[in-house]
Amino acid sequence: MNALITLINMVAWLLQVMLIVWIVLGLLAQFNIVNARQPFVAAVMRSLDRFLEPILRPIRRILPAPGGIDFSPAVLLILIIVVRTLLVDDILIPLALR
């Protein structure tokens, strides 16, 4: 059971890091700080987009985009943090105290 909870926590952490990298890289490309046409940057952005888009799509259907601003990455980041916090505080700590 502990191994499964640890695995879920690690996957959630990896997803959180990928989402933050995707957000920062997108902002850097938008403000022309990073050249999005450079092969390495384009490959990283494309692979992160392909991985995160199916996860963000259901949130985008539910959440309206006021003024063209996409809040779905922020919502997903908050959900990941809540899941990781609940997982650690409500499951891992009580299991460790037994």
Image: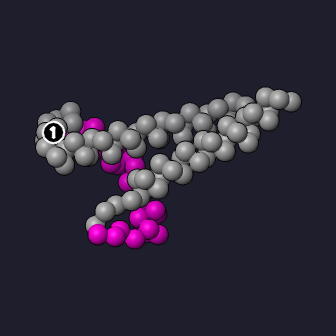
Which of the 4 quarters of the picture holds residue 97? top right
Question: Is residue 45 rendered to the left or right of residue 53?
Answer: left
Identify the residue shown where x is 51% and y is 50%.
Answer: 78
Identify the residue shown where x is 16% and y is 38%.
Answer: 34
Which of the 4 quarters of the picture holds residue 25? top left
What x and y, as percent, mark residue 72?
Answer: 41, 58
Identify the residue shown where x is 75% and y is 33%.
Answer: 93
What x and y, as percent, mark residue 5?
Answer: 68, 36
Q: What residue type is labelled 1?
A: Ile
Residue 26 in the image: above or below residue 44: below
Identify the residue shown where x is 47% and y is 52%.
Answer: 76
How many numbered circles are shown?
Answer: 1
Quadrant for the N terminus, please. Answer: top right
Q: Which residue lies furthest to the right in this view?
A: 98
Q: Is residue 90 visible?
A: yes
Determine the main secondary structure of the stretch shown in magenta: helix
Question: Is residue 89 rendered to the left or right of residue 64?
Answer: right
Q: Name the residue under label 1.
A: 33
The answer to whether residue 47 is magenta is: yes
Quadrant for the C terminus, please. Answer: top right
The answer to whether residue 62 is magenta is: yes
Question: Is residue 47 rendered to the left or right of residue 31?
Answer: right
State the extent of the magenta-drawn residues as a range.
Answer: 42-67
What x and y, as percent, mark residue 66?
Answer: 34, 70
Which of the 4 quarters of the picture holds residue 19? top left
Q: Is residue 47 visible?
A: no
| Protein image colouring | one colour
Label 1 secondary element = loop
Question: Is residue 15 rendered to the left or right of residue 88?
Answer: left
